[in-house]
């Protein structure tokens, strides 16, 4: 999953980044509102963590402009402000939840996972498609109750396709999702990941369908 952190406190930004990377998120980070807005408008994310007290452009304005750009990924706001009006303003701007500084990192993790589940329309961390189950928190895939070993890129490819079940996902969209902004991108590797996945999770049943000239669609027809 792809996450954006917009936080001007260097040490806190690093701590959050490390925590989210430990959960296997691909993380982009920005230290001011203008840079955060650029990332939020230009790239696809599964979730954004945005501080309200940002330099150059405050967090409320960043959230408003991200929503105005049509981006609907969940947003968790961080604020050192204890006033309830600031929290309400953040939620009314388009945020989905808030966390007041200082906070316990366990609570941040729980709120992030809850927002991801809610966004995916899931009550639990596990998606089930007939004999195939995907636990996106534990990064565990099972087929007929047997654990399937996947690389991190293979898992992230499967997770993204499954989370958008029924939708055609282009190679460029998958490439953008899989790679952080500071890595070289090669859409040809998507074919490799998908080919490996098919060998590992498919036999008589097909989950990943190629839509010629458009991309891939994950679909289970039980």
Image (cartoon, rainbow, N blue to C red):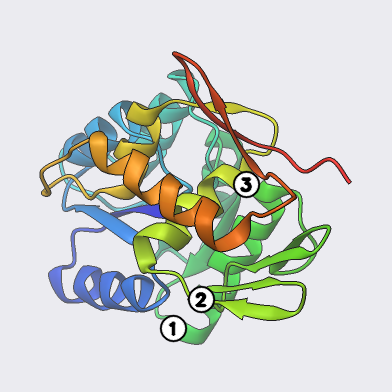
Tags 3 and 1 touching, CB below 8 Å: no
Residue hosting label 1: 105
150, above or below 1, in the image: below
Q: Nearer the viewer, residue 134 or 6?
A: 134
Give the farthest residue toward the right: 222
Residue hosting label 3: 163
Q: Nearer the viewer, residue 193 or 15?
A: 193
Residue hosting label 2: 109
Tell me the SS state at disc 2.
helix
Q: Nearer the viewer, residue 202 or 27?
A: 202
The first of marks 2 and 3 along the sequence is 2
Please identify, in this view, whether the residue under mark 3 or under mark 1 is nearer the observer: 3
Query: Can residue 48 be seen in the rendering of this structure?
Result: no
Q: Residue at x 35, y 79 (%)?
A: 22
Image location of residue 1, percent across then percent down: 44, 55
Q: Residue at x 42, y 75 (%)?
A: 23
Image location of residue 41, percent across then percent down: 33, 27
Label 2 to label 3: alpha-carbon separation: 20 Å
164, above or below 211, in the image: below
């Amino acid at each position: 999953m792809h996450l954006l952190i917009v936080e001007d406190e260097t040490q806190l930004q690093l701590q959050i980044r490390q925590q989210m990377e430990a959960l296997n998120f691909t993380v982009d980070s920005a230290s001011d509102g203008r840079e955060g807005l650029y990332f939020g408008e230009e790239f696809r994310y599964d979730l954004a963590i945005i501080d309200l007290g940002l330099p150059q452009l405050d967090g409320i304005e960043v959230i408003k402009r991200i929503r105005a750009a049509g981006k609907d990924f969940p947003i968790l706001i961080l604020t050192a402000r204890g006033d309830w009006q600031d929290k309400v303003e953040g939620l009314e701007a388009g945020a989905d939840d808030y966390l007041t500084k200082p906070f316990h990192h366990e609570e941040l993790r729980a709120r992030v996972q809850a927002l991801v589940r809610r966004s995916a329309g899931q009550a639990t961390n596990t998606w089930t498609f007939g004999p195939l189950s995907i636990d996106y928190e534990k990064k565990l895939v099972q087929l007929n109750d047997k654990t399937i070993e996947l690389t991190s890129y293979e898992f992230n490819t499967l997770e993204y396709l499954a989370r958008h079940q029924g939708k055609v996902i282009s190679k460029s969209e998958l490439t953008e999702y899989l790679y952080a902004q500071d890595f070289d991108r090669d859409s040809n590797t998507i074919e490799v990941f998908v080919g490996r996945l098919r060998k590992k999770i498919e036999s008589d049943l097909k989950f990943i369908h190629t839509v010629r000239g458009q991309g891939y669609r994950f679909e289970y027809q039980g």
